[in-house]
Amino acid sequence: MKTKHTIQSLREVIEEDRSKGFTIGFVPTMGALHEGHLELMRRAKRENDRLVVSVFVNPIQFNNKEDLEKYPRDLESDSEMLLSVGCDYLFAPSVAEMYPVPDQSSYDFGALGDVMEGAFRAGHFNGVAIVVRKLFEIVEPQKAYFGEKDFQQLAIIQQMTMMLKLPVDVVPCPIVREPDGLAMSSRNQRLTAEERALAPKIHQILQKAVLLKNVLSPQEMRKWTFEQLSAIASFKIDYVEIADDKMLQPVQHWNDSEGMVLFVALFLGKVRLIDNLRIF
Ligand code: PAF
């Protein structure tokens, strides 16, 4: 595996591979890698000749200073994990390399950008879109892999790719969970032992809620889920939502011909966790 810190040096090696006809698969990350990331990478490795992974904690997508400061960073341990999945190129740029001048691009994702994470984290998706666009322009992958835990982020990136006509196939990948059901996330590392023991309740409650789809309306399921989560004193809920799986707009009636997903975002102590589960 070659580690590159500059855009120029990464482009040189990728260009050489491309000139030999190799296909490029890409997994953008913010590091603090876990099994969920590794699953994306194994798939990217299977489906492409070369695997490029970026590790870059993107400051402009954080709307909370403490979250940015506390975001776990450990390039050495990330590199070891990348070696284990056969990563060819690790791209780990500095903030100055990615943003020599501030990028003022502003994207309008319409209704998709206004709900859930968009409503609770002002500017977050604009920051994600800027960095992912830049990374796509640098790496020029045929395929890029994103996890469905960040379901709305994935939808935003798919929309951006269409809006800007970027020649990248955005590949959605299923959520990877711990044996107790907790969705894998770099933020899980920051949970205390007590919080970690409570965290699987999120998935357990979502699972129970989805089983009630034949007896509860969407409004009732949302309320039921909210009440069950609220009963756990340490959970401070940002939102519980039931939305369609395309534009992520709130659902009023069940329609099993349309994809529908139950979403939740909450704070457990100082750590913000999100999860989702498909209903239809
Ligand atoms: O999901 C993430 O880790 C980040 O939002 C991403 C896509 C790497 C952009 O910084």
Image (tube, rainbow, N blue to C red):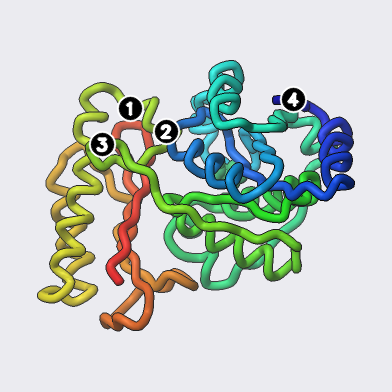
What residue is rendered at 42% in x and 70% in y? 245
SS of the residue at dot 1? Answer: loop
CB at mark 3 closer than 8 A to ligand 1?
Answer: no
> Residue 63 falls in which quadrant of the image?
top right
Between disc 3 and disc 2, whose residue precedes?
A: 3
Q: Assess whether mark 3 and mark 1 are in contact (beta carbons under 8 angstroms).
A: no
Between disc 3 and disc 4, whose residue precedes?
A: 4
Of 39 and 127, the residue lying toward us: 39
SS of the residue at dot 4? Answer: strand
Q: Which residue is mark 2?
A: 187
Quarter the C terminus occupies = bottom left
Q: Which residue is mark 1?
A: 191
Q: Which residue is mark 4?
A: 2
What residue is rendered at 79% in x and 38% in y? 99
x, y percentage for residue 241? 32, 64
Classify the position of ligand 1 by quadrant: top left, top right, bottom left or bottom right: top right
Q: Assess whether mark 1 and mark 2 are in contact (beta carbons under 8 angstroms).
A: yes
Q: Nearer the viewer, mark 4 or mark 1?
A: 4
Q: Identity of the amino acid at label 4?
A: Lys
Between disc 1 and disc 3, whose residue precedes?
A: 3
Q: Nearer the viewer, mark 1 or mark 3?
A: 3
What residue is rendered at 32% in x and 54% in y? 264
Q: Which residue is mark 3?
A: 179
Q: Identity of the amino acid at label 2?
A: Arg
**Residue 61 visible to the viewer:** no
